[in-house]
Image (cartoon, rainbow, N blue to C red):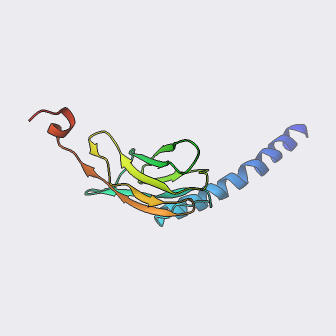
Amino acid sequence: MWLSLVLGGLLVLIAPRRISSQSVNRAADAGQVAIDADDIGGIVSGPNGLEAGVWVIAETKDLPTKFRKIVVTDDHGRFVIPDLPKANYSVWVRGYGLIDSQPVASSPGKTLALGRRHSTIQQITGTR
């Protein structure tokens, strides 16, 4: 009896997570990024499509000290920069072998579509 109660409790704990992850997957399939009022989110794409594994940086000087938060895009080029203080942010993309994208002005609660460019070997190493 005790084992069935424990297993029953686990099923109750697991079931909401499965529903939640299914709804997240459906949102991902639609190209949407779920954010809160204190997040900045979006997608990063390049010449060959969505970009996985690149850094997305949000920085502000509106606070008493310079504030920067960095996240990495997922396999589908999506990102969420969570729990940001209210401020105006510059957001840009950086990654190995990439030229930094131009900063985009944003604030928490916004969704962005960012782009990036590849650099050449000469630009990375400084050789010609």
Q: Nearer the viewer, residue 95 or 12?
A: 95
Q: Residue furthest left?
A: 128
Residue under the image location 19 percent in, 32 percent down: 125
The image shows a total of numbered marks equal to 0
Q: Nearer the viewer, residue 3 or 39?
A: 39
Horizontal side, residue 115 vs residue 10: left or right:
left
Q: What x and y, as percent, mark residue 123?
A: 18, 39
Q: Is residue 16 above or below residue 127?
A: below
Quadrant where the C terminus sits is: top left
Q: What x and y, as percent, mark residue 119?
A: 21, 45
Q: What x and y, as percent, mark residue 29?
A: 48, 63
Horizontal side, residue 128 vs residue 47: left or right:
left
Residue under the image location 65 percent in, 54 percent down: 18
Q: Nearer the viewer, residue 61 or 16?
A: 61
Q: Is residue 103 above or below residue 29?
A: above
Q: Residue furthest right?
A: 1
Residue 127, quarter of picture: top left
Residue under the image location 38 percent in, 58 percent down: 114
Q: What x and y, as percent, mark residue 45?
A: 34, 57
Q: Residue furthest front?
A: 64
Horizontal side, residue 25 vs residue 101: left or right:
right
Residue 22, quarter of picture: bottom right
Residue under the image location 48 percent in, 60 percent down: 106
